[in-house]
Amino acid sequence: MIRIRLLRNATLLVEMSNKQILVDPLLGDKDAYDPVPWTSNGIRNPLTELPVGEEELQEIIEDTDAVLVTHTHNDHWDEAARRLLPKDILLLGQVEDEPAFLRQGFTEATGIAGAYQYEEITFTRTGGRHGTGEIGAKMAPVSGFVLDNDEYKLYIAGDTVWCEEVEEAINMYEPDFIILNAGAAQFDMGDPITMTVEDVLKVCESSYAEKIIVVHMEAVNHCYLSREELRRAIRDAGLEDRCLVPEDGEEIVLVQS
């Protein structure tokens, strides 16, 4: 079985090859953190509570076999996650972030430069661009990851806009399923730093993936693209059966057991 559950923002539970992987945990309470810098709306983050209570969250953590952090911006790896997760859990991420994970006390942190084999699943790092120009350079490094169990490939693109690296990952790995971070996040200056409507549609056009799941919306103050706006564009393009926009807490079964 391959099953995806969106908790909030880019925080996902991925069930694959009988393993539960927690992706990009943002576990803090609503309003726990200051607004993202260089934004003018002054709204604290996260914008919403998790769709699970404390008891269920603890059960999720206890059932998690590994954590995957695509990059360490606060909306993907927050203080609450660092506090709540066991320090001996398998923690996978960018090789650049491994020293920070170890300093934070995570003894089983492993930075991935190329690929990493975890039982039946191979994690392969892919590139991305968290914005354009000078802003994109300052936001680096960010990564995506392809999870491959020899039957299916799941591409988690991470915080990136449509770019050459994303196109290369799609062409090289030919993923069966893709998860995109949208929201069209933007500072008060510069271009969006996560996927826009146009970026999402470009991925749909460029990929043969059976399902494309779009997350990273309505949770952080600099994300301006709403689910409804994206769904409307997806419907207008005739892609509503292939490109899915889940609500917080929603579960999507990609492959039945």
Image (cartoon, rainbow, N blue to C red):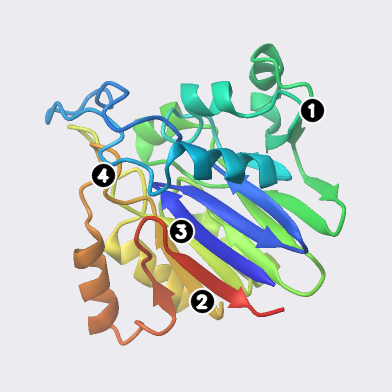
Q: Of the two numbered discs 2 and 1 on the same chain, state the one appearing first in sequence.
A: 1
Question: In the rendered image, which residue does mark 2 sit on?
Answer: 211
Q: Position of residue 114 (x, y in %)?
A: 77, 44
Within 10 angstroms of label 2, few (less than 14), some, or many (20 or more) residues? many
Mark 1 or 4, which is nearer the eye? Answer: 1
Amino acid on which the number 4 mark rests in the picture: Cys
Q: Quadrant of residue 40 in the image? A: top left
Question: In the rendered image, which residue does mark 1 sit on?
Answer: 108
Instruction: Report, in whole angstroms, how far the alpha carbon at label 1 lies from the one at label 3.
Output: 27 Å
Q: Of the two numbered discs 4 and 2 on the same chain, state the one appearing first in sequence.
A: 2
Seen in the picture, residue 56 relative to 197 is either above or below; the reply is above
Measuring 66% from the left and 26% from the top, which residue is drawn there?
96
Q: Is residue 69 visible?
A: no
Instruction: Report, in whole angstroms, how far the alpha carbon at label 2 lies from the one at label 1.
Output: 32 Å
Say which element carries label 3: strand
Report whether 107 appears left or right of 245: right
Within 10 angstroms of label 1, few (less than 14), some, or many (20 or more) residues? some
